[in-house]
Image (spheres, rainbow, N blue to C red):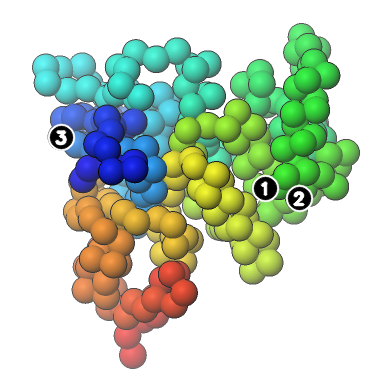
Amino acid sequence: MTGTITGKMTDPIIDIKNARVFRKHVRVFDNLNLQIHAGQHTAILGPNGAGKTTLLKLLTRELYPVVRDESYIRLFGEELIDLWQLREKIGVVSHEFQNNYQAIATGLDVVISAFFGSVGIHGHNQVTEEQKQRALSHMEQLKILELKDKQFLMLSTGQQRRLLLARATIHTPQVLIFDEPTAGLDVGAAFALINDIRHYVQQGGTLILVTHHIDEIIPEISRVLLLQNGAIADDGDKPDILTSEKLSKLFDVKMTVSELNGYYKWAPNA
């Protein structure tokens, strides 16, 4: 697919060509090809084991493809990119990171830690007043300022995830990757988080949503990619992909898909 901004063709911000990727000696992808352009809000949908987490780790440089001819991963036009620059360009919120964030830290510490790429604030981290004020202002904008003095590990899952979203977006990244955003949240917390994500998109960022729940796919997302058994099974405009027939095949269960106010939902066939 191609991306456009104000009618002009743009270079892809993510460009994967013929990627072969292994995790623990298991080949997850063989010839993965994918391009995502700025402003092309994309949902990557698939069952457990489809390769979603592996794809996420490719985009964050936690995994690399096998080196071979005519194969590459380019982020923002670069095959080699400084990790500090990448952290400022791509914000990530994932279950894995949330589970690993075990530092004794306040809500404010969590957001500030983005400036150091750390889990919590440590003695060698010299926090400036400018960094502190930026973090406080960002938390106020996201309406979570009341969490600034509370211990992260004592907060609800939803509160923790909103803090991690604030941490991921403190640099105003060009791309936000969100893995299973509402998993484990009650309805109120899920709606609050969805509103935060929509606010990020409306400010001009590019969203990549990794999920196996179609109700997380916000109205602003226009493209959906179906991932199955380490391959892209389908890729296209949201209304063409989120159909009863295609999702029944993807998840191997008969279902009916419907849409209301820009959101999709599914139900098992009787």
Question: Which comes sooner in the sequence, label 2 or label 1?
Answer: 2
Q: Residue at x 71, y 47 (%)?
A: 142
Residue 195 seen in the current view:
yes
- Residue 159 image point, x, y percent: 73, 51
Instruction: Write down the residue under mark 3.
Output: 31
- Kind of residue at disc 1: Arg
Determine whether, in the image, residue 163 is placed left or right of residue 51: right
Looking at the image, do the residues carrying marks 2 and 1 touch, with CB atoms under 8 Å apart?
no
Binning the other alpha carbons within 10 Å of mark 1 as few (below 14), some (14 to 19) or many (20 upward) gives: many
Question: Which comes sooner in the sequence, label 2 or label 3?
Answer: 3
**Closer to the camera: disc 2 or disc 1?**
2
Q: Which mark is residue 162?
A: 1
Q: Residue at x 39, y 76 (%)?
A: 259
Viewer-proximal residue among 80 and 65 = 80
Q: CA distance from mark 2 to mark 1?
A: 10 Å
Determine whether, in the image, residue 81 is placed left or right of residue 203: left
Q: Residue furthest right?
A: 149
